Each structure stands twice: as structure tokens, then as C-alpha cells.
Image: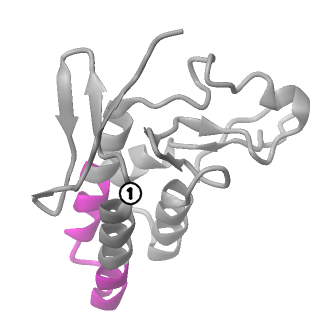
Amino acid sequence: MLFSLDASGRPVPIVNSDETLALLFAKPEPATLDRDVASVMRPFPLGLLTDAGMVVANPVFADHTLKARFTNHAYHGTVVWSWQQALFASGLERQLERTDLPGAFKTASADRATNTLASHPSYAIHAKLGIVELAFRGRPLPCRTVRLQRH
């Protein structure tokens, strides 16, 4: 699990999408992989999945002062970046292709991810250049288009 530290060296209690980088570029142990995928896929307000897509950061466990810095007006706040969702889908696909993970673990993880993502309302984001479609295991995910507006 990746996290930031405050000036005193204590972890900042922000649920974030940084784990998606490890999915794409690392080989986490099965327990770490399971924990990180569950954290990313947990529905907002406890996790990152919203009707608009995956938010970059969620201050649900932070104090009020810190929460004020992670709003939907902050660059690293409760905002949706479509590339982060694509990174998650690609990284999860890469992990499920690993030969060193137990078969039962991969089947359970794939089923959980497929069921969660397939039932989630938004896996296409109307981006500046058009629609970004996400696929999982080679199949497009059911989705609706969400138009994001700048404030």
C-alpha cells in the first residue's frame, strides 16, 4: 500500500488510487494485491468508486482540516482522472495473467472485479478528446457516459 507522510512522518489517512501503479508495474504478494484491489474498488464514500468513476483521493478517514484540502476542487482531491481508471483496468489484467498467483486466488479476484466493475454505472468517461472506453479481460465494460464539467 502506498501512502504519503505528513511533516511528522505519520501516514496521511487518504484513500488513494496510487495502488493502481503497483498493479501495472510491480508484483505484489497475493495478500497485498487483494487488499489494494479491494481498497480501490470499494464504493465511495469509504472507497474510490463513484457514479462518475474512480476518484483519485478520498479523505474519508482524515480530520476536518485535511478533508478541506482534498475536495472536488483540488487537483489531487475527490476528482476523476479517466487515465487512472484505465491504469487500474490494465494493471488488474496484468496481475491476473501472473503465473505465480494461486488459481483460486485469480479466479476469486477476477470474479469480484468483473462483478463490481460490470455493475458499476460509469466505465466510460466523456473526456476532452472523446469517449475513453475501459475493458477488462478483453471485453468492454458496460458503461454510461458521464460528462465532466470544469468549475
Q: Which sits in the foreground, 127 or 39?
A: 127
Task: Say whether residue 151 is left or right of residue 121.
Answer: right
Q: Residue furthest bottom?
A: 104
Magenta stretch encompasses residue 94: yes
Residue 131, percent across and down?
A: 19, 29
Q: Residue at x 31, y 59 (%)?
A: 92
> Residue 51 in magenta?
no
Instruction: Give the residue at x 28% y 78%.
Output: 100
Task: Report the residue at 75% width, 35% height from top.
Answer: 5
Q: Which quadrant of the figure contains the C terminus?
A: top right
- Judged from this view, the residue extending furthest toward the left is 138
What is the total number of numbered labels drawn onto the structure image?
Answer: 1
Decide whether the magenta segment is chiefly helix, strand or loop: helix
As drawn, 31 above or below 76: below
Q: Secondary structure at mark 1?
A: loop
- Residue that badge 1 annotates: 120
Question: Could you say where residue 114 lies in the image, as x and y percent from the top left?
Answer: 30, 69
Q: Which residues are magenta?
A: 90-108
- Residue 130 occupies quadrant: top left
Residue kind at label 1, given as amino acid type: His
Residue 69 in the image, given as x and y percentages of width and height: 75, 22
Q: Nearer the viewer, residue 1 or 139?
A: 139
- Quarter of the image where the N terminus is located: bottom right
Query: Is residue 122 toward the left or the right of residue 35 in the image?
Result: left
Above or below for 144 versus 37 = above
